[in-house]
Image (spheres, grey):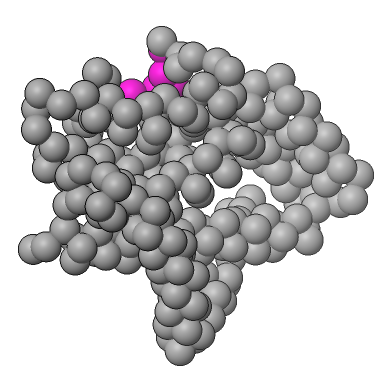
Amino acid sequence: MSSFLGAFVFLVLIVITLMIYIYVITVVVRYTLFVFRYINPKVRNFIIIMFLLVTIFKLVGLIPAAGIVWFVIWMIYIFIKNRKSSKGWFINGVKDIFIPPKSIFIVGTKRTIMLFFIGLLMINSAYWLKERYQWVNEKHAYLDAKEYYAVGNVLLFYRATLSSILSPENNLLRPMEWLQRAIVAKGTALIPKDDAEPAMWNYRFFWYLYARNTHLPTQAPNPLGKLVTTIVPLKPWIV
């Protein structure tokens, strides 16, 4: 497989990853709106305020705790609302509030999804070609590796954008990081081992996200991150 074709395959994987992110976010928003329509406005405002406070105190570490708080509040609300109802009220209340209709998971027709995929691929292809024009030319060495460097910059754009809001170590960004590591592994394999250029790749695609945020990686990743990296072993790209 030529480097150009390999880079294009990674571009397609980037677009698919973006579509999965967009789909999950859409479903979560629709599910949240589905659940919220059952909640008393005062309770709803209390949940929103509590969630914002928890998020402010610890953006990443307490998200599971925030989820538990939400669940407890919903259970209390179901109990208060249905305590005088007929037998089986608790199970029925849980089903009514937490189990959404299948339509929530349908975000569009196959034709719409395909058109969206093609449009997203075209937009990212334009960005990729711009990067290729800058890096894959006679001014640079190891042009086969630069094919992967160019497509890596496409993914880095999204990671850098999201890491300006979330921590680069946030588990929500792990799939993008894994894909970035695969691109870097493929590209640096085409560079001689005695060359220092892989160090520049490491800074560009990994350490840059910390440098721009002026903080170091944490020494103790949260349990979910540790669990995922145990199940899917990843070698650190530290030069």
**Residue at the (27%, 20%) spot, across then down:** 238
In the image: residue 164, left or right of residue 184: right
The N terminus is located in which quarter? bottom left
Q: Residue furthest front?
A: 139
In the image: residue 65, left or right of residue 33: left
Q: Residue furthest bottom?
A: 111
Residue 81 rendering spot, x and y as whole percentages: 80, 50
Above or below, comparing residue 72 to residue 3 in the picture:
above
Inspect the magenta stretch and tell me whether residue 225 lies in it: yes
Residue 209 rendering spot, x and y as whole percentages: 49, 30
**Residue at the (15%, 26%) spot, across then down:** 195
Q: Residue furthest right?
A: 42
Q: Report the span colored magenta.
A: 220-226
Above or below, comparing residue 60 to residue 144 in the picture:
above
**Residue at the (11%, 62%) spot, across then down:** 2
Q: Quadrant of residue 32?
A: bottom right
**Residue at the (32%, 43%) spot, across then down:** 180
Residue 114 rendering spot, x and y as whole percentages: 42, 82
Residue 134 rendering spot, x and y as whole percentages: 39, 53
Front residue of 33/40: it is 33
Inspect the magenta stretch and tell me whether residue 29 lies in it: no
Above or below, comparing residue 128 to residue 71 in the picture:
below
The C terminus is located in which quarter? top left
Front residue of 195/21: it is 195
Front residue of 104/181: it is 181
